[in-house]
Image (tube, rainbow, N blue to C red):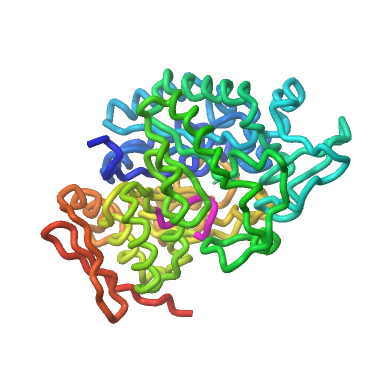
Amino acid sequence: MPWWEQAVVYQIYPRSFQDSDGDGVGDLRGIRERLDHLVWLGVDAFWLSPIYPSPLADFGYDVSDYTAVDPQLGSLEDFDELVAAAHERGLRVLLDLIPCHTSIEHPWFREHSDWYIWSPVDGPPNNWVSAFGGPAWSRDEQTGRWYLHSFYPEQPDLDWRNPEVVEAFQGVVRFWLERGADGFRLDAIDRLIKDDQLRDDPPASGTFPLPLRDDAAKLRRIYSGNRPEAIEALGAIREAAGDALLVGEVFQPTSEYSRYLQVLDLVFAFEFLFSPWNAERLRAAIGAAAELRRVAWLMSNHDFERLATRVGPENLRAAAMLLLTLPGAAFLYQGDEIGLANGPGADRTYDRAGRDLMRHPMQWDSSPTGGFTTGDPWLPAVDPAERNVEAQLDDPDSLLHLYRRLIEERKHLGEPFRLLDKDGGIVAFERGEDEIAIAVTPKPS
Ligand code: GLC
């Protein structure tokens, strides 16, 4: 059985996990200092949200160099030390690979402009919209030509039909594997390849089961993304990755996932993540995803409402139980194990799409910065006096201890998995001999 099949993977948002040098931003050395937290929890691996140099238009998801570490987060030597320390403790390390687009400040954009997607006319050639709202085409002031960006204008899309792009990425994958990475979370890969004729997306029919911005919700994304050709392109990443773990972020309904699973090991179960906290809807989302057998269950990440805010504090124990008893891999976002809710953001806005709230620092102790930094944190702590790792360690009934117990006990859950029909707000299923029943209480409004 591959190591990841039943793994628990802990998502670290590097800027907000632990600062080691007092500049208010988390870093790789800080992560190394906190690895024993992950060991205590019993997780198998951690995924680092991007650590590469970035002008931070999209907080690391706009990469300006794929084979270096952002100086604010550390150096390649720090990365090597982190990997060594993780491996010594039996923890595997996953990196975030962002193949769909680079930063507009990546030297490739000027040196290899044919690696990007340009409009053949003077203006947008079609109706495609960006994930953050507005047209997916912007004018490059230097050349006057229009380029495609599926996300922010600072993130021009690469042209994966160009074999040089494919080769460059295979090189990036090999670079990190040689440095000890154990796998990758692949960012936004349903946007990897677009229609070669740049046809208009048709109007949406029916509702898309995942949240979209208004203008994106009006279109059926069949030409601007989710192309069948993406599977071949991903095959090239697989070829370079060998048997390293590849987890795909495919922002599509569950029914689309099986194609991607031809080349990927896991895909995130987004319909499960976005299911209303309601037994019937959860059961439907679980049933469809569980049939694929290779989904990564998740209840939050750095992009969407934090778990405690979404389901309410009274449901946190049930949510933990659900996440960690479903069959297959589970991803856990830093802070969820102590019940951290959305924060208020800061005086200045960092992320234009409003995601600062989900990225506040980890709370290790009750001090004003939660032990995250000795300096001035880039985003303030939310409520360290009420919620922190140290206090919950001292309390065997805490949420933190529950997470640890569930991570330990899930190793003994059997197969097969079978969903049961139960009324009364209960999600119930069998795992081999065991029957698990979780009461899902609607969040008070
Ligand atoms: C993914 C990331 C998100 C980022 C986007 C563009 O959805 O999770 O944070 O903004 O891709 O790279």
Q: Residue at x 36, y 71 (%)?
A: 314
Q: Does 301 lie within the magenta span?
A: yes
* Horizontal side of residue 99 vs 243, given as left or right: right
Please state the horizontal and vertical placement of residue 121, each as a whole percent of the image.
Answer: 85, 40
Which is more toward the observer, 423 or 239? 239
Please state the horizontal and vertical placement of residue 92, each as a whole percent of the image.
Answer: 34, 32
* Quarter of the image where one finds residue 68: top right
Which is more toward the observer, 440 or 144? 144
Asked if residue 334 shows in the view, the reply is no
Q: Which residue is drawn at 25% across and 65% down?
A: 419
Asked if residue 27 shows in the view, the reply is yes
Which is more toward the observer, 49 or 219? 219
Name the residue furthest left. Answer: 433
Q: Does 196 lie within the magenta span?
A: no
Whether 336 is drawn above or below 264: the answer is below
Q: In which quarter of the image is the N terminus?
A: top left
Q: Is the magenta stretch mostly helix, strand or loop?
A: loop
The span picked out in magenta is 298-305
* Quarter of the image where one finds residue 190: top right
Q: Which residue is drawn at 77% across and 24% down?
A: 110
Which is more toward the observer, 442 or 280? 280
* Horizontal side of residue 312 vs 206, given as left or right: left
